[in-house]
Image (cartoon, grey):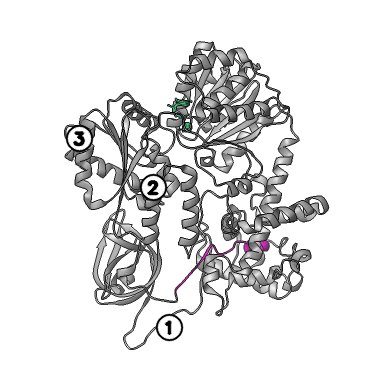
Amino acid sequence: MASSDNTVLDQAPCQTLRGVGPRLASLLAKRGIYTLQDILFHLPSRYLDRTHLTPLRDVRAGDYVAIEGTISGHRVSRGAKGSLTCELQDNSGTIHLRFFHFNSEQIRQLCVGTALRCFGEVRYGYQGLEIIHPEYLHLIPGKPLEIDDHLTPIYPSTEGVSQFQWRRLTDQVLAFLTAGAVLSDHLLHVQDKFSLPSLSMALHYVHRPPLDADRQQLLAGVHPMQQRLALEELLAHHLGLTRLRATLQAMTAPVLKGSTALQSQFLAQLPFKLTQAQQKVFTEITADIQRSEPMLRLLQGDVGAGKTVVAGLTLLQAVASGYQSAMMAPTEILAEQHYYNLTKWFEPLGLNIVWLSGKVKGKARTQTLAAIQDGSAHIAVGTHALFQEAVKFKNLALLVIDEQHRFGVDQRLALREKGLQQDYNPHQLIMTATPIPRTLAMSVYAHLDHSIIDELPPGRKPIQTIVLANDKRDKIVARVNEQCLAGRQAYWICPLIEDSEKLQCEAANTTYQQLSAHLPHLKLGLVHGALNVNDKTTIMQAFKNGDIDLLVATTVVEVGVDVPNASLMIIENAERMGLSQLHQLRGRVGRGEAESFCVLMYQSPLSDIAYERLQVMRTTENGFVIAEKDLALRGSGELLGTRQTGTGRLRIASYTRDSILLPIVKEMAQVLLQTQPLVCDALINRWLAEGLEYGQV
Ligand code: ADP
Ligand code: MG
């Protein structure tokens, strides 16, 4: 082992540590962790509070709990999916413990009458609340177990690396640090100005909070030691995005002058007039694409705001300028819908629109690829298949990407490389229906320009949202029957089962069977993620044509599906879903003439936060309001978690909670970029595991 006092943490490889061999090193490398510094900046994502026991009556799904009880039931099921299930009881209630990996010793030990203390995350299972693979300790009568008096750090999970291993790894690196290993503190010069603790002190504290730590602060993520690291992280991201934007702006893009004649011809055949908001954003886009610098614009617009027609106009401008353009959507259903619209709009104008997805094979594929390569295809529409290596454009000048947050980093990278096959870079328009609060947008998407369609097309009817407990199911089913017999169509959205697409599909299947039995006079359809694309598309098309009355679905229908005659949506276990997701789902109705309803079903009892969240859905249809509230509720609600979605991949900072730091970050970034390019490199390298890939568009 290297001697610790002169180890340079950002140089020393992980294998310097005891217990790290080639196997573990390669697992870590998969996560972008190569050096001791990388280990040190793999920060706890949360802390578990094992300092008190929760009575079983008060246990809720999603909570991490420490519980005690006696085993009152014990069952072993064999077969491929063998499991050991124990029922644990205290004097207030029961819960199930479920093991998928277990040995005969455990079967013997975990017998009825055994008293246990367990730790773990509670979830809903088929038999009610359960903990899968809890950690457990045996309780011995007359020998009380001590309860922890400090917080347990939990590290972001890495496949194959256990929490125990993470604690061992960080222990060793922290010891190196104590012994004087080298780790540059890039904020030393501002330490006094902002009364910051040193980097080393902050890291020690955050990895191993001492017994007297202010627990509330720490759990809420606002402890000064955490804020020291959060500031540095936000700074690194800001530097990264600024660099990225500068790199992209230094590239050249074709000037797209377009043709007003073609544009007028297109607009004249539309059955509606553009809203003012649509016109405004199109003007912004037009100004961008007429410059020789690549456009990098994020187009936000609530569900149903009419982003597609704006995209269409933009694609048309590229084609009218003699170039190709492309539109990509994350799912087959969505991409196909775009293809359908663009074909309907542009074929009458003499344009050639081609379709490419993974399922286009053989001769059709060869022809499509040829048309893209020789330029006879004016517009290519499809899924990420558009960006496979075999696809070569003759002169791609514009990319429209719908719902880009659904694309992985790899795909975004591939996409950028498409542009680089040519000696210029295409313009990029990124569309999202996920409303992003302003403060967030300015930071997370600091490298993009922003346009917002802040007005819905006229004539939209409000959607009535109703919140009901699951036990009112019969009533709801009767209502669905009534509406569908009257000629309307409905969606039935099945519960979200996190982490298991397979279980989710099985659950949807069961719901479909049950509803079919209860609704013999209706035609039902079922779509879920496990169906192959052909079947999915066929069913969606049948629903669109009105051949299916009730569509039972998992959340796959979330984005973009447009069936105006559907006026009723039922969402089961709505309390488990994010508000933005509910908003997207609900946006599938309220698109036609009839009055629309959305029924949010929940499993009682509801926690206060869950209740408040559903109330937000009931009282507003404004996506931005919903997004703001969602963030606010999540921020204050999830005391134990700093889990967040949709805000980039921050390790410790939170754009909302730490928004007070953003002006400081901006100021520091400006100074650093001008005076200390090497420090900028070091910070980006330290915090952005995949370097500049982050935020790449
Ligand atoms: P989103 O922004 O969610 O992608 P779409 O582009 O799918 O929304 O538009 C939703 C619906 O509104 C479509 O049926 C579209 O034809 C219609 N639409 C778009 N713009 C207008 C407008 N200015 N007036 C009336 N209807 C419009
Ligand atoms: Mg859309």
Residue appearing at x 45%, y 76% in the figure:
51
Quick one: label 2, few (<14), some, or many (20+) residues within 10 Å?
A: few
Disc 3 is placed on an element classified as helix
> 427 and 601: which one is in front?
601
> 98 and 519: which one is in front?
519
> 485 and 21: which one is in front?
485
Q: Which residue lies furthest to the right in this view?
A: 675
Kind of residue at disc 3: Glu
Residue of label 3: 482
Residue appearing at x 68%, y 19% in the figure:
257
Compared across the picture, whether 665 is left or right of 274 comes to right
Looking at the image, is 171 positioned above or below residue 462? below
Residue appearing at x 43%, y 40% in the figure:
584
Residue 552 seen from this side: no
Q: Give the range drawn in magenta.
A: 36-50
Residue of label 2: 619
Residue 544: percent from the left, percent from the top?
34, 26
